Image (cartoon, helix red, strand yellow):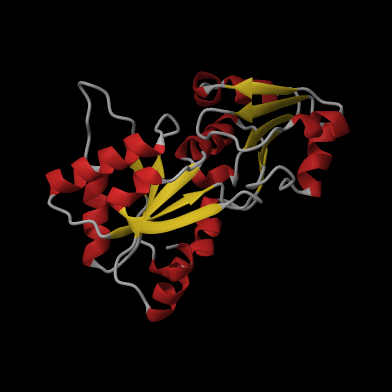
Amino acid sequence: MLYLIGLGLDSYGISKQGLDIIKKAKKIYLENYTVDFPYNLGWIEDITDKKIINADRDKVESLELIDEAKKQDIVLLVYGSPLTATTHITLLQESKASGVKYRVIHNASILDAVAETGLQLYKFGKIASMPAWKKSFEPTSFMGIVKVNNSIEAHTLLLVDIGLELEEAIKQLATAAKKEGIKLDKIVIASKLGTDRSKVIYDRIENLRNFNIEKPYCMIIPSKLHFVEKEFLRNFE
């Protein structure tokens, strides 16, 4: 069987159910390419007596895990909750096609934790991803999602590529917004949500370069604010 187990957002966020499965499984893999981990997982190896093997993009996107799961119980550990990335949905599809049983152990994710900012979850629109720009590749399509969300007065959760430091991400955001004709006011930066080192900042984009923000972090571009949201966001100014 193939198990997808969510680690949650802090070092001890994994469930007892998840730990029990790890103890019984033959191989434990860690998906390590979609997030900068804010904690160490060595304690899981210590209490389960199982070695955690790093699994890069090629490993996860190939059929290797499914082939292994045909013969023995295989675990893939995922930061947050397992099904927030489309790659993991594909794993389930391939498992079904191959006749391999699977089980998903859900957990907390950034999609829950952004409520810590005071912005109401039901007012979020489509999620956008900001890739790291290269010399010959500077996409601004993520701002199209911002534009659509703004048109329905919905907030935008912007997931930032793990390779982007805050200063560069802000520079890209400002450039893309100008190119797409979108005026940015105050935005939210949320770092290490769900951990005891979480940090939320609400300020104008030109001021955000002055803050020390640790990875992983995300950005939120608010649309029209409810008065309760406005009041709560003042805590982060």
Q: Residue furthest front?
A: 210
Taking the image as drawn, is residue 98 in sight?
yes
Provide residue 212's location: percent of width, then percent of height: 47, 42
Residue at screen point 62% across, 32% down: 99
Residue at screen point 32% across, 50% down: 207
Residue 206 vertical placement versus 168 (above, below)? below
Judge from the rendering whether residue 9 lies leftward or rightward of residue 189; answer left or right: right
Closest to the observer: 145 or 2?
145
| The quarter of the displayed image where residue 160 is located | top left
Judge from the rendering whether residue 223 lies leftward or rightward of residue 35; answer left or right: left
Q: Residue furthest bottom?
A: 227
| The quarter of the displayed image where residue 54 is located | top right
Looking at the rendered image, the quarter that the C terminus falls into is: bottom left
Closest to the observer: 34 or 179?
179
Looking at the rendered image, the quarter that the N terminus falls into is: top right
Provide residue 23's location: percent of width, then percent of height: 84, 33
Residue 150 vertical placement versus 2 (above, below)? below
Taking the image as drawn, is residue 120 in sight?
no
Provide residue 170's location: percent of width, then percent of height: 31, 42
Provide residue 42's location: percent of width, then percent of height: 76, 29
Residue 149 vertical placement versus 21 (above, below)? below
Residue 186 vertical placement versus 90 (above, below)? below
Residue at screen point 26% across, 38% down: 172
